[in-house]
């Protein structure tokens, strides 16, 4: 959106039709409008938001009284008096003319009544003529610059530090996604989910009774799963927020005199507790592995006794080793001589006797195996003793760690009690808040665990249902087609979700880098802005051992907000140039700011003034004479190509006149009205003529 011109008619301070305010563009992209307080700067800012969105800024008083006082005073009773604002802008190589018009009447009792306003839009065609579009004006504007985002482009500089309050974080995240185009994907995913549900219902209607029943169960479980997933994300974000608050409170307690020792002791005890719990977990894991690997030994004692009884019996019955080696008997038969000297010639009784012993002798392998097994079984008792000793050692270790944890918890209770009862009321209050947060985190963690169990259980059941549904052969072609569509829909949901996740992550990281770059340029502090997943913007001090979150001052919040706005314009401009199918199809954005320097000191005023013309393609700033001081004028002058003065005509007889001196020429800011009415004139400054 490139702003071209603005004109008002009987709108608040501006009587009749004002001159057309034309806006700067190109390299000298800055338009400056000077005016004293009450002269109409805020009215001009709200003229933009009213004509485009019928919205007003928080500082705009009595928004129901838009008609100019003199215009309504000069009108007859019950005669409608017109007021309007007209704006021209370009977007995507098209020129638009937008006019919002309203009427007000007064009765004999001077009671004012305004009618509903009307919005008119014309688009310039290539032949130079203006034509009304087919689409409603509101839809066209919403596509060019959505209403949810207007606050980042038309705003009061003294109030932008409110942008990043905790209760507005969700709005910022959602608004930024709208600007990026992620919301388009969100809407597509929601639409596909609804389509999938319709297809499932269609399949349920045409399927057999078993399929219907299974699908019904699947739909219910998927619905419950989606609800739990949403709740899990809510819990994660809530816990993150609570952890951040906990860090801030802990930091405050460390800074408070008297509480520092107690807080450090508490942190030490918390660290000890975490370490002991880790040791406890490891000891339990070791015990589990020991029982799993060696627990069988506890049941082998009776088997061992049976083994030796059997061995003894076999040896008694000479079914096992008799002590005579097979190789020894074979040697006797080969030499044909017994150890007693008797000849062992074949076919003799002595030969057959010794040969029969050969058949009864066991092999060497069997004998060796029995001996090895006997040795191993003899080790069972010793190994069993060692096993029970290790069990006792680990069990004692676990009991000791439980005792240590109980002691630490008792110590923590004492420290917490001391902090709760500390004479300093601030310390008491911080401790109460800290305990409330810790209790809340505990509750949420428990709920998170229960939900995760439920999700795991539901996941298994859904998988089983999917398999059962798969096994049920669909009877009709319609069933097959419906199922195919359901699968295609599910795949589309998964792909879009992946694209959405990657787009958002890439953009958020890029946005954070740009915010840090702008903030570093403006601020003289070493702090670094951080943008979390919810687009919550915080400041961190990285000069300490560990990054510490800083409570930003009002001035720092103003700079943070400016950095965010400048970064988002830069990144969305870059994004839309690279991704013409995503997001807002334009790379031009204006910034219209009332009182851009707020309560900033001189150093920050200079840095902000130096940055402003580079933050957006177009800059319109509305300033008082005081705000337009030396350092601001010096930094912005080279970017100015359009300037206007708001001349306030006061009806006060003895009003003090005021002047603005620019390039050695005095321009009136306040002067005596020629009638009984107060009103404001708009006068353009011809800077080029002044320079000559």
Image (tube, grey):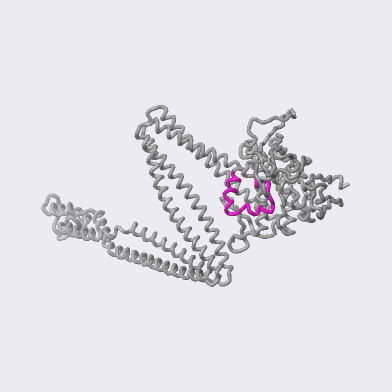
> Which residue: 55% across, 44% down?
501
Residue 377 visible in this rendered orientation of the protein: yes
Residue 385 is left or right of residue 437, and the answer is left
Provide residue 33's location: percent of width, then percent of height. 77, 48
State yes or no: residue 153 in magenta.
yes
Tell me if residue 650 is in the magenta stretch.
no
The spot of residue 641 in percent (x, y) is 79, 45
Image quadrant where one finds the N terminus: top right
Q: Which residue of the protein is positioned furthest toward the right in this rendering?
A: 692
Whether residue 653 sits left or right of residue 346 in the image: it is: right
Q: Position of residue 50 (x, y in %)?
A: 67, 42
* Point 36% across, 37% down: residue: 213
Work out whether 38 lies above or below 581.
below
587, above or below 295, in the image: above
Location of residue 463 by image quarter: top left
Please identify the dominant SS of the magenta region. Answer: helix
Q: How many marks?
A: 0
What span is colored magenta in the figure? 150-177
């Amino acid at each position: 959106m490139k702003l071209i011109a603005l004109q008002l008619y009987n709108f608040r301070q501006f009587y009749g039709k004002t001159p057309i305010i034309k806006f700067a563009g190109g390299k000298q992209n800055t338009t400056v409008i000077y005016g004293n307080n009450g002269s109409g700067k805020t009215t001009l800012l709200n003229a933009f938001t009213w004509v485009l969105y019928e919205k007003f800024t928080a500082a705009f008083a009595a928004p129901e009284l838009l008609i100019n006082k003199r215009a309504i005073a000069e009108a007859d009773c019950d005669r409608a008096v017109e007021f309007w604002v007209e704006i021209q802008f370009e977007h995507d190589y098209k020129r638009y003319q937008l006019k919002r018009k309203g009427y007000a009447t007064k009765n004999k009792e001077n009671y004012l009544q305004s009618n509903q306003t009307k919005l008119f839009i014309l688009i310039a065609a290539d032949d130079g003529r203006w034509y009304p579009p087919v689409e409603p004006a509101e839809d066209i504007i919403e596509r060019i610059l959505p209403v949810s985002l207007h606050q980042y482009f038309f705003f009061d500089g003294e109030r932008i530090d409110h942008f990043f309050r905790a209760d507005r974080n969700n709005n910022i995240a959602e608004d930024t996604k709208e600007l990026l185009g992620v919301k388009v994907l969100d809407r597509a995913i929601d639409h596909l989910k609804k389509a999938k549900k319709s297809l499932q219902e269609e399949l349920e209607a045409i399927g057999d009774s078993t399929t219907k029943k299974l699908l019904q169960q699947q739909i219910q479980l998927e619905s419950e799963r989606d609800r739990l997933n949403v709740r899990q994300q809510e819990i994660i974000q809530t816990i993150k927020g609570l952890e951040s608050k906990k860090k801030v409170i802990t930091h405050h307690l460390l800074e408070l005199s008297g509480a520092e020792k107690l807080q450090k002791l508490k942190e030490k005890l918390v660290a000890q507790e975490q370490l002991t719990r880790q040791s406890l977990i490891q000891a339990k894991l070791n015990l589990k592995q020991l029982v799993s690997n060696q627990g069988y030994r506890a049941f082998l004692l009776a088997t061992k006794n049976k083994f030796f009884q059997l061995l003894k019996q076999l040896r008694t019955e000479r079914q096992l080793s008799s002590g005579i080696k097979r190789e020894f008997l074979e040697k006797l038969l080969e030499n044909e001589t017994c150890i007693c000297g008797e000849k062992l010639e074949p076919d003799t009784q002595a030969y057959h006797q010794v040969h029969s012993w050969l058949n009864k002798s066991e092999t060497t392998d069997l004998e060796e195996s029995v001996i090895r097994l006997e040795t191993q079984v003899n080790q069972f008792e010793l190994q069993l003793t060692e096993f029970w000793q290790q069990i006792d050692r680990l069990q004692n270790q676990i009991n000791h760690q439980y005792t240590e944890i109980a002691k630490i918890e008792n110590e923590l209770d004492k420290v917490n009690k001391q902090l709760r009862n500390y004479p300093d009321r601030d310390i008491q209050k911080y401790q109460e808040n800290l305990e409330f947060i810790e209790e809340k985190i505990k509750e949420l963690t428990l709920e998170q665990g229960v939900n995760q169990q439920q999700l795991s259980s539901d996941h298994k059941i859904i998988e089983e249902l999917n398999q059962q549904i798969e096994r049920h052969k669909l009877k009709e072609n319609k069933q097959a087609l419906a199922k195919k569509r359901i699968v295609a829909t599910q795949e589309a949901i998964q792909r879009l979700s992946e694209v959405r996740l990657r787009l958002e992550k890439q953009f958020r990281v890029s946005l954070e880098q740009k915010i840090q770059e702008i903030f570093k340029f403006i601020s003289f502090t070493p702090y670094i802005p951080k943008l979390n997943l919810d687009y919550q913007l915080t400041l961190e001090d990285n000069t300490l051992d560990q990054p510490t979150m800083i409570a930003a001052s009002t001035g720092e919040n103003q700079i943070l907000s400016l950095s965010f706005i400048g970064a988002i314009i830069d990144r969305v401009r870059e994004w839309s140039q690279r991704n013409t199918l995503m997001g807002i199809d334009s790379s031009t954005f204006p910034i219209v700011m009332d009182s851009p320097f707020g309560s900033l000191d001189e150093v920050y005023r200079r840095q902000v003034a130096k940055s402003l013309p580079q933050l957006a393609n177009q800059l319109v700033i509305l300033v008082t004479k005081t705000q337009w001081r030396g350092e601001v004028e010096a930094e912005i002058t080279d970017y100015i190509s359009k300037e206007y003065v708001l001349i306030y005509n006061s009806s006060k007889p003895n009003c003090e006149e005021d002047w603005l001196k620019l390039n050695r020429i005095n321009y009136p800011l306040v002067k005596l009205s020629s009638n009984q009415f107060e009103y404001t004139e708009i006068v353009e400054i011809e800077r080029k003529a002044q320079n000559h």
